[in-house]
Image: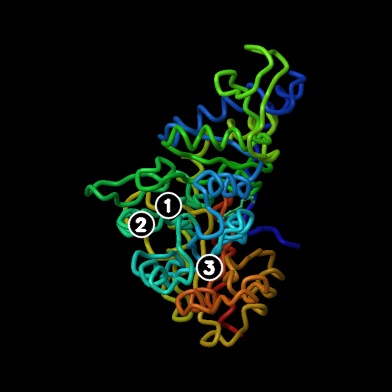
Amino acid sequence: MIRYPYCQPDIRDEDRAAADAVLKSGWLTQGPAVLDFETALAETLDCRHAVVVNSGTAALHLAYHGIGLGPGRGLLTSPITFLASANAARYCDAPVVFADVDPATGNITPETVEQALADSPHPIAAITPVHLAGRPCDLAGLAAVAESRGIAIIEDACHAPSARYPDARGGTAAVGACTHSRAAVLSFHAIKHIAAGEGGAILTNDDALAARMRRFRSHGMVREPELWQSAPEADAPWYYEMEEPGWNYRLSDINCAVGRSQLRRLAAGIAERAALAALYDERLGNLGWLSLPPAPAVPGGHAWHLYPIAIDFAALGLSRGQVMRRLAAQGVGTQVHYIPLYRQPYYAARGHKPLPGAEAYYARTLSLPMYPGLTQAAVDEIAAAIRSLAAG
Ligand SMILES: Cc1ncc(COP(=O)(O)O)c(C=O)c1O
C-alpha cells in the first residue's frame, strides 16, 4: 500500500466549511464566489486581472485564443511538461515547436529558445515557458529574446505560483505578477498548491485580453449593452449577442470557495514545502548515483510543487521501473515529470524529433513525495528507502 503518494491535497475544516456555505446558499454555478476568488487571486499574486476557468487546460486555451494563436501563428514551448501546455495550442490549430531544456532543471532557456526559433519551420507568435516543479525559468532572459521579435510570453505557471526569479532591473519578481509576460496560467487541480478539485486561472495586466477571455469562457456571449450591434431595444433585459463562439469554461462557486480558502494558505504551504525540500537535500546528499534538484536562483526562488531527484540508473544497477516498484513496495509513491512531448505518438507522427537536453533530463528524473502535511519522520523513512536501493 502507498503510504506516501508523490502528491496529495491538504484539505482542512475551513475548506469544507467554505464549500458548505456555497451549497447552503443555493447558488452553485458562476456567482459571487467567482468574483471573490478572482479579486483575492489578483491581490495575492499582484496582478491586475485574474480570470478563473474550469481547468488549467482551459486557461491555456483561452490565453492562446486570446492572443490569436492559429495557423501561421505558432507556439514554442518545452517538451518537459504536461500534455496541456502544447495541446491547447493545437485546439487553436496553431503549430507547436519544442525548444530544448537545461538538463539540470528541465526548463527552457534563452539560448535553447534562440536555437529553436532559428530552426523553426513555423512563424512563432507565443512562447510558453513552463516553470517545472516550481522553479521559474529565466523570464527576464526569455522576455529579451521574445520582445525583440514581437513574440508574446504566456507562462505555464501551474507548478510555481508566487515563486521568485531575478527580474531585468537587478531585483526579483514573483510568478503571477506578469512582470515579463503577457499572461500566466495556473491550475487548481487536486494536487496543485491551490487545490479546488478542478479549476484554473489566467493572470494578466492586459485589460483587453482579460475582457476577451472573460467573454470566451462563457460561449462568447456579450452582455454589455454598450457593445451590442443589433439589440431590439436599449437595455433589453433578456438580450445577449455572440460574435464568435466561445466555450463553457466556467468555474463553479463551489470550486471558487474552496480555492479562495486554499489561497489563504498558499505562502504557508510553500514555506512548508521548502522546509521539506531542505530536509530531503540533507538526507539524500553524498550519493554518487543521485543528484539533488539544483538550488533556487534567489531566496523564495522555488514553489516546490515537486521534488525531482535525478538518478543515474545505470550506476545504481536498477531500471527506473525497478526503482519505482521497490519504493512502492515500501509504501513510497513516485512519478516521472514528464515524458517528453515529442515522444507522444501524436507529436512524433508530426515530425517532432528528440532533443538532447530533454532526453538527458527524462532519462534520470524521479519525483519524490512532496506536500504540506508530510512529516519529518516520513521524509526520513523515504530517504532511508532510497538509500537502501544501492544495497541491491
Ligand atoms: C505544467 C502543467 N500545465 C498544465 C496543466 C493542466 O492543468 P489542468 O489539469 O488543471 O487542466 C497541468 C496540470 O495538470 C500542469 O502540471
Q: Residue sitting at 64 percent across and 22 percent down?
A: 230
Residue tagged 2: 146
Residue 96 image-quadrant placement: bottom right
Q: Position of residue 253 (x, y in %)?
A: 68, 28
- In terms of sequence position, does the residue under pointer 2 or pointer 3 come before the other? 3
Image quarter hosting the N terminus: bottom right
Between label 1 and label 3, give the one nearer the viewer.
1
Q: Position of residue 372 (x, y in %)?
A: 56, 47
Q: Where residue 345 is drawn, which disc sits there?
A: none
The crowding category of the residue bearing disc 1, from other C-alpha atoms within 10 Å (few below 14, some 14 to 19, many at least 20), is many
On screen, 157 above or below 218? below
Kindly report the distance in space between the C-alpha atoms of the residues bearing marks 1 and 3: 16 Å
Q: Name which residue type carries label 3.
A: Pro
Kindly report the distance in space between the C-alpha atoms of the residues bearing marks 1 and 2: 7 Å
Q: Position of residue 5 (x, y in %)?
A: 66, 58
The foreground one among 205 and 223 is 223
Residue tagged 1: 153
Residue tagged 3: 79
- In terms of sequence position, does the residue under pointer 1 or pointer 2 come before the other? 2
On screen, 53 above or below 149? above
Residue 216 image-quadrant placement: top right
- Circles 1, 3 touching at the beta carbon (< 8 Å): no
- Circles 1, 2 touching at the beta carbon (< 8 Å): yes
Q: Name which residue type carries label 2.
A: Ala
Which SS class for mark 2?
helix
